[in-house]
């Protein structure tokens, strides 16, 4: 399948003096990085979700919208670690008939994050292979493979001094029943699969 | 990989006394220590005003092997292959010195999932001895990481540290296989320190 990357923007947080918007392909929504990272409605300016509550110490924020504008993946990076967040809408897309016969329905957005447990096996495998414990890692979004899957690449650094690159596919399981964690994220909706050391 | 211990030292030092006035404007830097036998938790973070009751129920809990984070200790450069001059958290704009301040490390995912912010209070318990100390979340580590604590935290709960020689150079590690339980209290970063409650329990 041809990999088509519609929107992939990296924001250097340290250089942010004003809000940086990464707008969805359909132009309706944007991920806005300032002191927090939010999902906003472009037309109304209304904040729909707070995706990350602080960028104060982050070194990098990367945003990749899915081609259909109904999902967005995001990596926030710090000097020794990273986190993968995402948001999606499950509001059915309106047909022309819907639009003609009823008032527009607002899309309902949800947020999720990739649980650390997702990476446990590949970290363990890499620690066995390269020695020592994982002391730092970072990840980047490497393009949408389909409307429901995005490639993630990363690098791990071990206490042995060795490093290794790895990759996996992040799948959106938007029909799954997520577990709402204390941060308000519906865990279990994005899942990493097909991990591979490179 | 053959590891040769070139220095073994014990730090069983509890926090020394300090007062709220010092805590209010404490600096995160300081000289630190390159001698694993001389890790002294000086001002530390003491304990939270109001004690354990002020913290409520922990939002995050883990029990795992203890690992040392030497970041922020300027004297530790060269004693850890992954040493960083800075910590993610800062005190008055300076790194949080691992040798002086009791802190714990969390991954970004753990923090987000549990609504934890830098500066939130934590307790660390040595599972073998029951010794417990207060600290704060002051560094962000890799995904999946648990049990990573500052040198001062380790010393305060009786975990011994040693500098060992590896083929990649010196590395500072815990002695034996200590395990710790870390509890983190979300939304407590604004609670000031009170040094009369610096150690939760000493045995």
Image (cartoon, coloured by chain):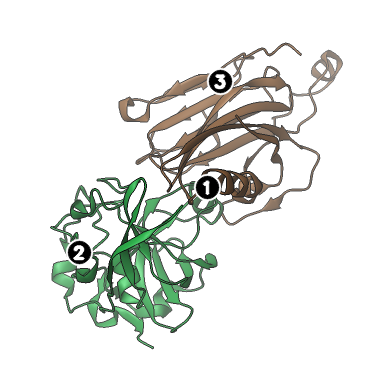
Residue B156 lies, with reference to residue B64, above or below; the image says below
Q: Chain of mark 1?
A: B
* Rendered residue at 50%/66% (across/down): B65
Label 2–label 1 contact, CB within 8 A: no
In the image, taking residue B120 as reference, residue A29 lies left or right, namely right
Q: Residue at x 71, y 46 (%)?
A: A188
x and y, in percent, of residue A27 in the image: 59, 15
Front tag of 2 and 1: 2
Q: Count residues near mark 2 (Cα–Cα under 10 Å), then give few for <14, some for 14-19, many for 20+.
A: some
Residue at the spot of label 3: A43
Task: Report helix, strand or loop for mark 2.
Answer: loop
Q: CA distance from mark 2 to mark 1?
A: 30 Å
Left or right, B69 with respect to A182, comes to: left
Residue nearer the viewer, A58 or A184: A58
| Chain of the residue displaying label 3 | A
Q: Position of residue B98 (x, y in %)?
A: 27, 59
Can residue B132 be spotted in the picture? Answer: yes
| Residue named by callout 1 | B143
**Quarter of the image holding residue B96?**
bottom left
Q: Are discs 3 and 2 both within one chain?
A: no
Q: The residue marked by circle 2 belongs to what chain?
A: B
Pick whichever of labels 2 and 1 is earlier in the sequence. Answer: 2
Could you say whether the residue bearing mark 1 is in a helix, strand or loop?
Answer: loop
Q: Chain B drawn in what color?
A: green
- The colour with which the image depicts chain A is brown
Tell me if mark 3 has few (under 14), some (14-19) or many (20+) residues whose alpha carbon lies within 10 angstroms of its own: few
Q: Are marks 3 and 2 in contact (CB under 8 Å)?
A: no
Q: Is residue B40 visible?
A: no
Q: Which residue is mark 2?
A: B35
């Amino acid at each position: 399948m041809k990999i088509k990357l519609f929107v992939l923007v990296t924001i250097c947080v340290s250089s942010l003096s004003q809000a940086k918007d990464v707008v969805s392909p359909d132009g309706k929504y944007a991920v806005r990085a300032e002191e927090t990272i939010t999902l906003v409605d472009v037309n109304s300016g209304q904040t729909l979700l707070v995706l990350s509550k602080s960028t104060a110490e982050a070194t990098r924020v990367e945003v990749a919208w899915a081609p259909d504008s109904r999902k967005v993946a995001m990596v926030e990076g710090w000097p020794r670690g990273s986190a993968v967040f995402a948001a999606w809408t499950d509001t059915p897309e309106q047909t022309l008939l819907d639009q003609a016969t009823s008032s527009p329905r607002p899309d309902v957005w949800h947020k999720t994050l990739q649980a650390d447990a997702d990476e446990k096996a590949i970290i363990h495998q890499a620690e066995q292979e390269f020695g020592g414990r994982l002391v730092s890692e970072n990840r980047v979004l490497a393009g949408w493979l389909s409307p429901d899957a995005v490639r993630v690449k990363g690098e791990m650094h071990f206490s042995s001094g060795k490093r290794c690159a790895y990759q996996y596919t992040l799948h959106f399981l938007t029909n799954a029943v997520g577990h709402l964690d204390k941060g308000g994220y519906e865990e279990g909706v994005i899942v990493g699969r097909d991990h591979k050391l490179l | 990989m053959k590891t040769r211990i070139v220095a073994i030292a014990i730090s069983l030092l509890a926090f020394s006394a300090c007062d709220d006035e010092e805590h209010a404007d404490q600096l995160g830097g300081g000289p630190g220590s390159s001698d694993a036998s001389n890790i002294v938790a000086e001002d530390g973070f003491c304990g939270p005003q109001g004690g354990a009751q002020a913290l409520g129920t922990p939002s995050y809990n883990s029990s795992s092997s203890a690992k040392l984070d030497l970041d922020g200790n300027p004297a530790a450069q060269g004693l850890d292959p992954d040493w960083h001059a800075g910590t993610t958290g800062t005190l008055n704009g300076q790194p949080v010195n691992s040798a002086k301040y009791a802190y714990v490390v969390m991954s970004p995912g753990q923090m987000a999932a549990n609504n934890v912010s830098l500066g939130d209070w934590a307790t660390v318990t040595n599972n073998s001895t029951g010794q417990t100390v207060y600290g704060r979340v002051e560094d962000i580590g890799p995904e999946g990481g648990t049990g990573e604590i500052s040198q001062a935290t380790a010393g305060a709960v009786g975990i011994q540290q040693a500098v060992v020689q590896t083929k990649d150079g010196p590395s500072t590690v815990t002695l034996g296989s200590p395990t710790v339980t870390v509890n983190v209290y979300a939304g407590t970063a604004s609670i000031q320190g009170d040094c009369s409650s610096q150690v939760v329990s000493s045995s």
